[in-house]
Image (cartoon, rainbow, N blue to C red):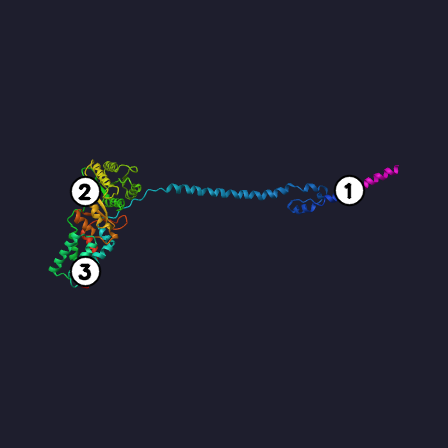
């Protein structure tokens, strides 16, 4: 029995001893991965690996390498946020500086404008210069030639009565004087055309203040004649001649008319009096004159709504505008804007407007786009109304005071034609 117990004890000791040898070897197998990380450790223990292998598996050193690479990106991400702020600060001042006061323009002087714009009459020059001078320069001026001359003048809208008078005078003078050279023919034709334009008519614009009150100019015309644009150009003519101006936007039926007039006025520093859309035009015109009196300006320029001359109600309304304005004093100028390309139709327009508002002068626009420059003669001969301003282009300073001699000189061209006669 004692031997049996002793054998069991020895067997237990052997089992425990064997287990003691096997277990450390099994625990020692994770050591190779830890030995790979060992170079990162400042003091890699070689002996401790066998005694306490589990303490090496999760060292705090393993957290440090992963924590250290994440810190620099956080520090590098900060600068882009700080760099994004300056562009926002730059945008704000630029938005504030966008609305700037427009720079006032200095209109071109009116003296000599017609001479500078003479090239714009090229289409009419073909009729008067090349056409008429070429006919007059022929070796023999028979009835057929004189009929051609008449046709040329009528085609240019000179008018039948004015054409016959011009041709009769030309025939008499060429027969009596025996004029044959190109230079003499040009001078002869120029004299007759200037005479037909009646150079004695008063073409000055009455825009000077009187008795402490501003002069009042009313601008009228049919639809599509370019009246509001012309009104803005007239304001530039007055400013160029040293006048201070207030504009009245009495065209209350066309929504863009007041804005268009305000744009023109803003370029020269003039003030615009306007009312709500569809307001009474006479009321706006009255307020404009009163504002001009308060400011002490030289001229009040009133733009009225375009209207057809055969619309009785609209023409009566135009008469009302004039009567209301005259409560401040008489209207000094009533300027009728005519489109030169309408030809003889402009004569009927002028006649009706004259009966309603007593037109004192004509502004003839778009002369640069037509060969019918003779309409200037027809308007004056038919109605006795002087042409005071002519439009020769779309530029802001392409409106010129009308001078008969300069106009005829431009029509006939720089040099006499037909010198081969």
Q: Nearer the viewer, mark 2 or mark 3?
A: 2
Please provide percent x and percent y for residue 209. 20, 40
Which numbered disc, 1 or 3, marks the residue that appears first in the sequence? 1
Q: Secondary structure at mark 1?
A: helix
Please provide percent x and percent y for residue 258. 29, 41
Q: Which mark is residue 135?
A: 3
Which numbered disc, 2 or 3, marks the residue that appears first in the sequence? 3
Q: Nearer the viewer, mark 1 or mark 2?
A: 2
Q: Residues within 10 Å of mark 1 (few under 14, many from 20)?
A: few
Q: Secondary structure at mark 3?
A: helix
Q: Residues within 10 Å of mark 2 (few under 14, many from 20)?
A: few
Q: Determine which quarter of the picture holds residue 223.
A: top left
Please provide percent x and percent y for residue 237. 24, 46
The residue beneath circle 2 is 355
Which is more toward the observer, 239 or 275? 275
Chain part drawn in magenta? 1-21
The residue beneath circle 1 is 19
Q: What is the number of callouts on the image?
A: 3
Q: Residue at x 20, y 44 (%)?
A: 352
Which is more toward the observer, 148 or 173? 148
Residue 20 in magenta stretch: yes
Q: Nearer the viewer, mark 1 or mark 3?
A: 3
On screen, 351 above or below 286? below
Which is more toward the observer, 48 or 322? 322
Q: Quadrant of the C terminus?
A: bottom left
Q: Is residue 205 something that shows in the picture?
A: no
Residue 150 in magenta stretch: no
Q: Quadrant of the N terminus?
A: top right
């Amino acid at each position: 029995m004692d031997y049996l117990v002793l054998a069991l004890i020895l067997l237990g000791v052997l089992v425990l001893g064997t287990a003691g040898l096997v277990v450390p070897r099994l625990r020692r197998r994770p050591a190779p991965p830890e030995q790979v990380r060992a170079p990162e450790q400042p003091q890699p223990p070689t002996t401790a690996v066998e005694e306490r292998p589990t303490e090496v598996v999760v060292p705090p050193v393993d957290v440090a390498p992963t924590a250290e690479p994440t810190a620099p990106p956080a520090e590098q991400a900060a600068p882009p946020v700080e760099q994004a702020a300056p562009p926002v600060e730059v945008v704000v001042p630029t938005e504030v500086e966008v609305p700037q006061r427009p720079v006032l323009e200095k209109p071109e002087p009116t003296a000599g404008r017609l001479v500078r714009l003479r090239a714009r009459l090229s289409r009419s020059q073909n009729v008067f210069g090349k056409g008429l001078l070429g006919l007059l320069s022929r070796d023999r001026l028979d009835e057929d030639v004189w009929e051609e001359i008449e046709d040329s003048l009528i085609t240019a809208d000179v008018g039948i009565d004015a054409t016959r008078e011009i041709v009769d005078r030309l025939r008499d003078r060429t027969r009596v004087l025996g004029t044959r050279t190109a230079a003499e023919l040009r001078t002869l034709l120029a004299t007759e055309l200037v005479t037909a334009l009646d150079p004695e008519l008063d073409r000055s614009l009455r825009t000077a203040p009187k008795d402490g009150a501003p002069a009042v100019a009313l601008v009228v015309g049919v639809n599509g004649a370019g009246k509001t644009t012309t009104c803005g150009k007239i304001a530039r003519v007055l400013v160029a001649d040293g006048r201070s101006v207030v504009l009245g936007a009495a065209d209350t039926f066309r929504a863009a008319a007041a804005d268009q007039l305000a744009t023109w006025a803003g370029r020269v520093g003039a003030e615009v009096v306007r009312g709500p859309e569809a307001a009474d035009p006479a009321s706006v015109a009255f307020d404009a004159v009163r504002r001009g009196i308060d400011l002490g300006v030289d001229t009040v320029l009133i733009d009225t709504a375009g209207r057809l001359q055969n619309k009785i109600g609209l023409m009566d309304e135009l008469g009302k505008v004039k009567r209301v304005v005259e409560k401040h004093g008489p209207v000094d100028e009533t300027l009728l804007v005519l489109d030169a390309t309408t030809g003889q139709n402009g004569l009927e327009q002028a006649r009706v407007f004259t009966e309603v508002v007593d037109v004192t002068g004509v502004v003839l626009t778009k002369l640069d786009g037509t060969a019918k420059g003779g309409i200037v003669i027809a308007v004056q001969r038919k109605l006795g109304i002087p042409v005071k301003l002519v439009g020769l282009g779309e530029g802001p300073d392409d409106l010129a005071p009308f001078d008969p001699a300069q106009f005829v000189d431009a029509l006939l061209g720089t040099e006499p034609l037909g010198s081969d006669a």
